[in-house]
Image (cartoon, rainbow, N blue to C red):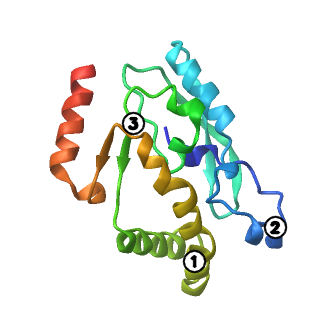
Amino acid sequence: MSQDAYYKDTGYFTPEQIKQHNFDHPDAIEFDLLVKHLDELRAGKSIEMPHYEYITTSRLKETTTISPQKVIIVEGILIFTQPEILKRLDIKVFVDAEADDRVMRIMRRDTQERGRTFPEAMEHYEKKVKLMHAQFIEPSKRFANIIIPEGGQNQVAIDILGEYIQSCL
């Protein structure tokens, strides 16, 4: 399950409101619905996970049916900021990435997928992403059971985590 699917619908915002809105703040996510969906999955019920469109900042009408499984992976950079989600996670993994790698990934994503120009992406990073990382994401890693350095490039850590998940199945 991706935290990003639970962005609040802001498709009705004006362009100026969208520009001012901080999508990198925990308040941008509908965590209550994510918690409800986690509880339903844990109770053996299927859920309808929302879809979110970054370009229009809208929640789409389509959903994806998610059936309960023995292992549920919830991913997102802000999930450790939410005590109600932390209570529901059996293992908490923080994937740590170097600042340079984060900047490059954000620049690439914002210009290729989210319709921003390079100067707009830089401004977004400087005024929102960097500040929210320092305020919310970096401090939240203290809640992790495991911190994986080197982002997704740490094959040893990924293999160990994969073995752990396999043992749960």
The disc label shown at residue 126, or none? 1
Instruction: Tell me if residue 40 comes above or below residue 156 in the rendering.
Output: above
Q: Using residue 58 as the reference point, say whether residue 158 is left or right of it.
A: left
Quarter of the image where one finds residue 102? bottom left
Disc 2 designates what residue? 17
**Structural crowding at the residue carrying mark 1, measured as other residues with C-alpha within 10 Å and reported as few (<14), some (14–19) or many (≥20):** few
Query: Going 58% across and 62% down the picture, which residue do you hit?
Result: 132
List x then y, in percent, for residue 24.
61, 59
Instruction: Tell me if residue 92 comes above or below residue 153 in the rendering.
Output: above
Residue type at mark 3 is: Lys
The disc label shown at residue 92, or none? 3
The residues tagged by marks 1 and 3 sit, at their Cα atoms, a distance apart of 28 Å
User: Residue 64, can we see it?
Assistant: no
List x then y, in percent, for residue 130.
54, 69
Residue type at mark 1 is: Glu
Residue type at mark 2 is: Gln
Q: Earlier in the sequence, mark 2 or mark 3?
A: 2
Q: Earlier in the sequence, mark 1 or mark 3?
A: 3
Instruction: Tell me if residue 47 comes above or below residue 104 in the rendering.
Output: above
Q: Give the label, 2 or 3, closer to the camera.
A: 3
The residues tagged by marks 1 and 2 sit, at their Cα atoms, a distance apart of 19 Å
Query: Going 21% across and 22% down the picture, which residue do you hit?
Result: 167
Q: Considering the numbered disc 1 on the image, is that residue within a helix, a strand or a loop?
A: helix
Query: Going 44% across and 40% down the picture, which residue do you hit?
Result: 143
Q: Considering the numbered disc 2 on the image, is that residue within a helix, a strand or a loop?
A: helix
Q: Give the label, 1 or 2, closer to the camera.
A: 1
**Structural crowding at the residue carrying mark 2, measured as other residues with C-alpha within 10 Å and reported as few (<14), some (14–19) or many (≥20):** few
The residues tagged by marks 2 and 3 sit, at their Cα atoms, a distance apart of 34 Å
